[in-house]
Amino acid sequence: MQIDKLSLPGAFVLTPKRFGDDRGFFSETYNQAAFDEIVPGVKFVQDNHSLSRQAGVLRGLHFQLPPHSQGKLVRAPRGRVLDVIVDLRAGSPTYGHHESVELSADNWKQLWVPAGFAHAFCTLEPDTEFCYKVTELYAPASDSGIAYDDPDLAIDWPFGADKLILSDKDRQLQAFKDFQSPFEYQRQSHEKD
């Protein structure tokens, strides 16, 4: 498995190997022992799978507040997404910064999103499927988010606002400047310079 660090501390892109022949391919998309070498002590408790019928579906920027904050391992096994994460950890050298990664069935990349990050994705083609493993169960009382179009974050989405398809809930998320972060940055031993 190829592992690439992102500019936001603690976030990684993982690309599992695929072995193919004329029948198709085989890939080990997750291995606990291998993941422990990258991010020790993570335990996944739930797998989620979504389908977006149209290009331009945007879901996010979502996160769960403590004590139910979630780490996520995300991928797009069908179609393509622009995946965006925002560092919400107070004291982080990259607090309020974001990074985007294209995840697709073709590039086979996965993204590790640590707890304390907001997460969103925008579909780049129709009939895109998105899968993610999470470290905490869904807790409605801890559900939160930041507006996808917040001017302080200045995220460059692949479609104009008039072309994006959002839920009513996602259109009403709070501004970044109004968010008081309960997340604290703690440098991990696996975060090397």
Image (cartoon, rainbow, N blue to C red):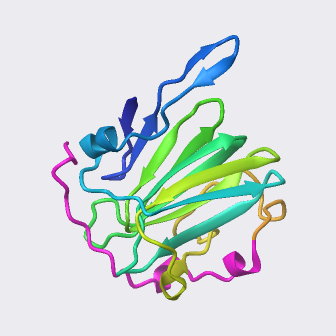
Looking at this rendering, what residue extends furthest in the bottom direction?
A: 141
Vertical relation: 100 (above or below) 59: above
Dominant SS of magenta comes to loop
Q: Nearer the viewer, residue 92 or 135?
A: 135
- Asked if the stretch drawn in magenta spans residue 187, the answer is yes
Q: Residue at x 76, y 69 (%)?
A: 166
Residue 123 in percent (x, y) is at 72, 51
Residue 119 in percent (x, y) is at 53, 62
Q: Which residues are magenta?
A: 167-193
Vertical relation: 144 (above or below) 86: below
Looking at this rendering, what residue extends furthest in the left direction?
A: 189
Q: Relative to residue 66, is residue 166 drawn left or right?
A: right
Which image quadrant for residue 168?
bottom right
Q: Relative to residue 115, is residue 26 drawn left or right?
A: right
Which quarter of the image is occupied by the C terminus?
top left
Residue 163 in percent (x, y) is at 83, 59
- Asked if the stretch drawn in magenta spans residue 102, the answer is no
